[in-house]
Amino acid sequence: MCKDFSHYNQKFMTRNIICILITIVLYLIMMIVIGIKFSKQNNDVGDFYLGGRKLGPIVTAMSAEASDMSSYLLMGLPGLAYLTGIADVGWTVIGLAAGTYLNWLLVAKRLRIYSHRCGAITIPDFFSRRYRDKSNVIMGISALIILIFFIPYTASGFSACGKLFNSLFGFDYHFAMILSAVIIISYTSIGGFLAASTTDLIQSIAMTAALIIIVLFGVDRAGGIDAVIENAKSLEGYFSMSSLHDYETGGSSSYGIITIISTLAWGLGYFGMPHILLRFMAIEDCNKIKISRRIASVWVVISMAIAVFIGIIGNAMTANGSIKALTNSADSEKVIMNMAMLMSENGIIPALIAGIIFAGILACTMSTSDSQLLAASSSMSENFIKGVFKVNLSEKQSMNIARIVLLVIAGLSIVIAWNPDSSVFGIVSFAWAGFGATFGPVMLASLFWKRSNRYGAVAGMISGGIMVFVWKFFIKTLGGIWNIYELLPAFIVATVFIVVVSLITGKPEKEITDEFEAVKSSKE
């Protein structure tokens, strides 16, 4: 008979649920303790927002990737693989893996050198200083973009946490969502960037443990590797990179070249993700970035591959009756939860291990939300209040304002996440496109094209942002060849605007080009 964990949501928790809850509570307490520890190392806003550029190669690599993956790693990827097979999820993984590697290879070292040379501690600050924008127009626009896309992005993380506790323990969604938000806010506002980065490292370990444990358990319950593979082969279009399996009908549909290109475009988003780019700026020794790149790339490829395999295993477990059929995307995203709950029925130790899996799911969301909160609060306090509006603050006042702004942004995110039926991954997809199209082309131009200027940068940000909305809500609805992920056309449009506007306006000042050449030749 198929297993369903809905019957666990009872007034009196069973033993296995209590064991899971104990594991999660201990994990959350550890996050807060880390925040308190690192609060003593925040002497100024540079420490709070960038950790004083003290991150080692391992922390840099793992915190960057943990803050990148979000709950998509343990929920989105397995759920998609469970329902449709390997095509959609496979091309997405390839795009994300390529984007991760290229971002580390092309952007990481040069951004670290450039931002250090010009004294920037946030992404808007870097753009403004790079182009010597004394009007602070670039700073204001880029800070506004961060607020527009990061507040709902953070809200989606809070929402995911609330749904997790609601599904597991029957807790009221709003109570669970607020509790999760309070914990994330606590260690982030107290410990700042170093706390967020260190907890991200630990959370990446939790994610890895969850992936490995559930694969071993799932393969065993599915009847072995051969049974998993045979089940996948028996489903039409499931094991193909050019077709999608239809779970309801059992048939398949074509996965064409336009869709493949559109899916691969997810990788372009990395060039504009502020919470990932900040990790590059914070690394202590830029000559060790190669180590970070190798660690990050290997971890991303292996973790995403395992996540996809979990979805395939889950389908096989449904086929042999171990877990219930998950017939839609909302349910299929819970496949790893179903597998973990099945594990917890085997005694106290398995229940505690299942708790690690759920802590891993929670870690995916928390590791992204803490980084987004810092990036959003820095854009408001450092770039709007001090940069655009020229408010002079002491270091102590700046630290207090930073924490207050973080709390306000978190509060707005809670309001947006109040609806329990809100789409988590729809928001993530749109925000990813927004950052990729507005910041990605500008970041690449600022690092690699000496002729680019502030007019081109402004034009690129505005055109990229507008095209994301236009394509998403108007052009894409036409369907057919227009059904392309909005990041790709918006990225292209922004790039064209940067090039054209830069060429038809004045050349950058000598001070700017001299700095560009100095960074280019630097071996720091």
Image (spheres, rainbow, N blue to C red):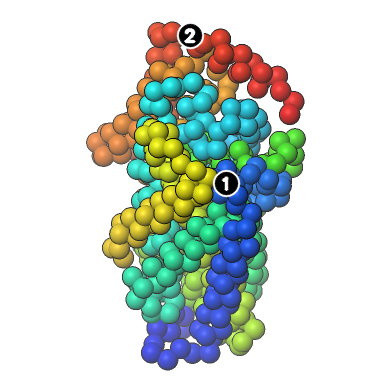
Question: Tag 2: Cα neighbours inside 10 Å, few (<14), some, or many (≥20)?
Answer: some
Q: Is residue 218 visible?
A: no
Depth check, front residue: 399 or 290: 399
Q: Residue at x 49, y 28 (%)?
A: 127
Residue sitting at x 64%, y 54%: 41
The amino acid marked with disc number 1 is Asp
Crowd around label 1: few <14 · some 14–19 · many ≥20 (10 Å): some
- Image height check: is 515 above or below 433? above
Q: Earlier in the sequence, mark 2 or mark 1?
A: 1
- On the image, the x and y values in percent for residue 273 come to 49, 40
Which of pointers 2 and 1 indicates the residue nearer the eye?
Answer: 1
Residue sitting at 71 percent across and 47 percent down? 56
Image-based side of 363 in relation to 201, left or right = left
Badge 2 element:
loop
User: Residue 44: which numbered mark, if any?
Assistant: 1
Q: Amino acid at mark 2?
A: Lys
Q: Quadrant of the C terminus?
A: top right
Residue matched to label 2: 507
Query: For the point 58% across and 82% down, which residue is it?
Result: 351
For the residues labelled 2 and 1, the Cα–Cα distance comes to 36 Å
